[in-house]
Amino acid sequence: MILIYSHKITPRLTYIFKHIFVRILQIEISFTSDISEFVSFSGPKLTYAKQALGKEFFIRSHDLLFQQGIQDVEISMNSWEEVPCFFPSMNSSIPFDIFAAGFYLLSRYEEYFPHKEDQYERFPASESLAYKSGFLEFPVIDIWAYKFLKVLKERYPDFEVIEREFEYISTFDIDIAFDYKHKGIIRTLGGTSRDILSLRIGKMIQRYLSIFGLLKDPFDAFDRIIQIQNRYEIKTLFFFQIGDYTTYDKNISATNTKFRSLIKSVSDYADVGLHPSYFTMRNSEKLKKEKTRLEKILNRPIYQSRQHFLRLDLPETYQNLIDLEVLEDYTMGYPSHVGFRASTCTPFYFYDLDYEIQTPLKVYPFAVMDATLRDYLKLKPKEAFRKMVAIKNEVQKVNGTLITLFHNEIFSKNERWKDWENIYEGFVKEMTLKNDKKIQ
């Protein structure tokens, strides 16, 4: 156990200290603002203040963890043994305030400032400090934590730490469960017309062979995904989009018995969560309607969620999820770039800067999405595979949690996903290989 002294114990301070010490480093901590208690303590201890009390481990504090609300923050990038960092801390045991910097990134502080949104009203990667400073593809909070631990153990060589294990979570967004089947007469005739006008006769034939059960629907890859899950013993989550039909939401109707049966069947083998539709980002009533709809299909509460189109408006979207008692969200990532939006590969609790509290919503940040690799980065399958492995290696170095986002469409062999069919299983197989590269 490490005793932490600060002149003021704030919610921000306890939040980020627990993320770095408890969730990443697996170290028990305790806090005090009593100087006599701290001085008399004989075990490992750390002072977080403007000046040290003695010869203990010392971090000269930035003001961020003692403030409230959103204030202008001056950031100047530095380097800690070739690792990017900011908020320099003079005369400290390490050269910057790891806790204030970690809080700035983890709380998504920068997303509360006015910023240029992309065409879908999202905070773009290009606006982030991580992208501008070149560390988006590195979980720097976790890297800092392990470097910090190394220095801490030099000060307290008898201090023992239990090392956490690398974890992989595979997730699938089911935007469109079937390419051709169960879409109703109007949508089927519309698709047929487009096939004829575009002279896609082969696709039209495939459409009707699928509809009449003579050919498996191209998007129906659910058995295969579950087989891969079982073969490699990985954790898999499915997020079903069951909102009403709109320009951006084109799944099968939630009233369709075959679609409902599919959701129930998948839930027998893997966790199922909600994929709230496009317009739920700021619409709590629509979000509630869809959550209730999925709960009725499964006949159980839904606690996991990921926003469609990754549309996330902080803090409103998360506040709405919390009000509906959603416990886990998997939206934290960028559609246009791979990497770590919150600069960590460790699940963390959302800190609400409006109310200055740690909330019960646990955020699971994903690092790689199939559509990012193909549509945004324009990578070929082999290039995409190498990029995914590079991200995986960074997470394994810090024994973190790697979360990937795929879509069932990647198995379809259609024009968009030609030659991508085996990428997912190949990556999962790679995932199971031992990688002994750790931060020393």
Image (cartoon, helix red, strand yellow):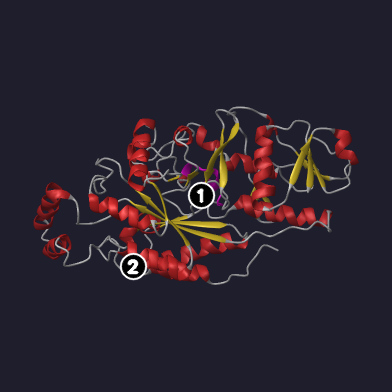
Q: In this view, does 299 lie to the left or right of 414?
A: right
Instruction: Name the residue rendered at 36%, 38% in the picture.
Output: 292
For marks 2 and 1, give the CA distance. Answer: 25 Å
The answer to whether 295 appears left or right of 128 in the picture is left
As helix, strand or loop, the secondary structure at mark 2 comes to: loop
To which residue does mark 1 refer?
365
Q: Which of marks 2 and 1 is nearer the N terminus?
A: 1
Give above or below for 210 relative to 21.
Answer: below
**Identity of the residue furthest to the front in this view:** 299
Which residue is under mark 2? 421
Tell me the residue at 36%/48% (across/down).
Answer: 298
Q: From the viewer's perspective, tell me whether residue 146 is left or right of residue 135.
A: right
Label of residue 153 in the image: none
- Cβ atoms at labels 2 and 1 below 8 Å apart: no
The mark tally for this picture is: 2
- Residue for point 54% across, 72% down: 433
Residue 266 appears at what percent x and percent y? 36, 57
Amino acid type of the residue tagged 1 in the rendering: Pro
Q: Would you identify the image quadrant in which residue 200 lies?
A: bottom left
Residue 119 visible somewhere in the drawing: no
Q: What stretch is highlighted in magenta?
A: 126-135
Residue 102 visible here: yes
